[in-house]
Image (tube, rainbow, N blue to C red):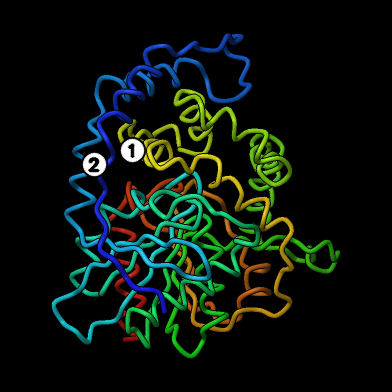
Amino acid sequence: MSAIAPFRVEIPQSDLDDLQARLALTRFADEIPGAGQGVGVERVKRLVGHWRDGFDWRALEAGLNAYPQFTTEIDGQNIHFLHVRNDDPDALALILTHGWPGSIVEYLRAVEPLSRHFHLVIPSLPGYGFSGPTRELGWNNQRIARAWAELMIRLGYERYGAVGNDAGSMISPEVGRVAPEHVVGVHVTQLFSFPSGDPAEFADLSEEDQAGLAVLERFWNEMGAFNVLHSQQPQTLAHAVTDSPAGLVGWLAQLFDEDLDDEFVVANAAVHWFTGTAASALRLYWENARAEQPKEPTTVPTALAMGEGDFTSMRRFAERDHTGITSWKTLPAPAHGHYTAHTATEALTSDIIEFFRDRD
């Protein structure tokens, strides 16, 4: 068994100086005003300006280092994680999983309220952030789930819950699948279940599910290009996002809601940049597109807590893939968008606490 080693974020000053030089030399793209062809130049200029003149990496670094951090090797891959313990040694543990284009920064605001009730393990996905780049093929959702199950056992947790957003909403149910004897429940902000093509699935759809299909169709028609590119040629894009911080933040911004604060967007971009994982983070899509998908549904108790205006999960299809759904809700206003752990921390963490209270 690989050792668990303490870790601190310590980015060299030379890397910060290099970034400032690159940002100062940004050559911004041309655009046709109002054409609606993707992330606009004005937003990228604003984000680059904030990164140059308003963002304090050392403050984020200090915030991360305020929490105990560790690394360990699992299945040949370095895994970085925050491990925040509750005062009660018998408290339930939760493993919280972020997605793309995010990072562990997604959950920083949730640490304090959740750690009052639970032990928290917040890993950086393989190929993301402080886990460093992946070095071999095969790191798909299922393999990550097996690594998470190993991590929790390695930390001494026989019973725990799995929480996720975005990719984490796909990985967390898989943790329940690979370790059902240990996982007491799964709490996610999306259930990515889609029609299989069977015409019978479309019979008598509820108005809610019909609306969900309409949102899904609109998303894929207008914003699905990132998924196709990541799934087919992530290495082609990798050269741009690895070399240009403006290119990186512009690419990531397509899936950071327009109403998110610039600080949050830049903080996540900076984690990708300083860890050299902008390229390897893209590979998860390529891996999942080639992975054999499980044929049987998950069975552990599962809760969905959607943000208003986010991906609309469709219950008929979700219940086909997850038979243990016990809670299905849209979080109350002002919970909105894809990153509710950051934007509606109280609403999301309260729902997590309520769901796992009955399973402790």
Taking the image as shown, residue 270 lies to the left or right of residue 40, namely: left
Image position, residue 252 (x, y; %): 50, 35
Task: Point out residue 76 in the picture as x, y percentages from the top left corner.
Answer: 52, 66
In the structure shown, which secondary structural element does the residue marked by tag 2 occupy?
helix
Q: Quadrant of residue 114?
A: bottom left
Q: Callout 1 environment at 10 Å: few (<14), some (14 to 19), or many (20+)?
A: many
Is residue 219 visible to us here? no
Residue type at mark 1 is Ala
Q: Residue at x 68, y 67 (%)?
A: 317
Residue found at x 49% / y 24%: 244
Looking at the figure, which quarter contains the N terminus? bottom left
Up the image or down, 46 lies above or below 241; here it is above
* Most distant residue in the left direction: 87
The x, y position of residue 153, in whole percent, is 39, 82
The residue labelled by disc 1 is 267
Answer with left or right where residue 293 lies relative to residue 66.
Answer: right
Q: Amino acid at mark 2?
A: Leu
Q: Are marks 2 and 1 in contact (CB under 8 Å)?
A: yes
Badge 2 or badge 1: first in the primary sequence: 2
Q: Position of residue 210 (x, y in %)?
A: 68, 55
Q: Which residue is mark 2?
A: 60
- Find residue 49 and report its image quarter: top left
Residue 139 or 350: which is nearer the viewer?
139
